[in-house]
Image: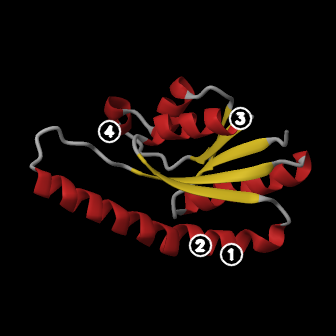
Amino acid sequence: MANVLVVGFEPSPAGERAVTFAVDLAKLSGSSLHIVHVLEWSPYSFLTPEEIEERHARRKEELSRAKESIIDPLVKKLGASGVSVETSIRYGHVAETLAAVAKDAGASQIIVGRTGAPGLASRLFGSVAGALAQASPVPCTIVP
């Protein structure tokens, strides 16, 4: 079975650095990449059937927009890298979702970029990197 590196991607300088690092590592190790973009989604318990239907319609639109504007351009950019790339877009808590994808893919590592919300907010609410370090079933690399 091939070595798989899961990369949590967001369209930002930190996300770009994580992908660049992952591509370089994949080339050195003969790994493939599974790039994951996670859309935060909070379910509500007390919605009417109409509201649930509306949320599902919005969800499909968000998935389509994310694929077209985030994932497709990235895959095109990585086409010349020579690295095998698989992608997915998921809803959920970022750290928990990346951990689940890594487990399902049999990944050997998760790579994310550090976005860094310095100060009180990150200490009170935590960060994706911190939560991922707690939830991940495999080693994590946080790219500065």
List the residue tagged with mark 4.
121
Check disc 3 and give the amino acid type. Gly
Q: Residue at x 28, y 44 (%)?
A: 42
The answer to whether mark 1 and mark 3 are in CB contact below 8 A is: no
Q: Is residue 127 above or below residue 35?
A: above
The answer to whether mark 1 and mark 2 are in CB contact below 8 A is: yes
Give percent across and percent down for residue 7. 64, 49
Left or right, 127 with respect to 45, comes to right
Front residue of 119 and 91: 91
Check disc 1 and give the amino acid type. Lys
Check disc 2 and give the amino acid type. Asp
Distance CA(mark 2)–CA(mark 3): 24 Å
Q: Residue at x 40, y 43 (%)?
A: 92
At label 3, counting other C-alpha atoms closer than 10 Å, the crowd grade (few under 14, some 14-19, many 20 or more) is some
Give percent across and percent down for residue 63. 42, 63
Q: Which mark is residue 76?
A: 1
Precedes in sequence: disc 2 or disc 4:
2
Left or right, 53 with respect to 37, comes to left
At label 4, counting other C-alpha atoms closer than 10 Å, the crowd grade (few under 14, some 14-19, many 20 or more) is few
The answer to whether mark 4 and mark 1 are in CB contact below 8 A is: no
Distance CA(mark 1)–CA(mark 2): 6 Å
Residue 29 appears in which quarter of the rendering? top right
List the residue tagged with mark 2.
72
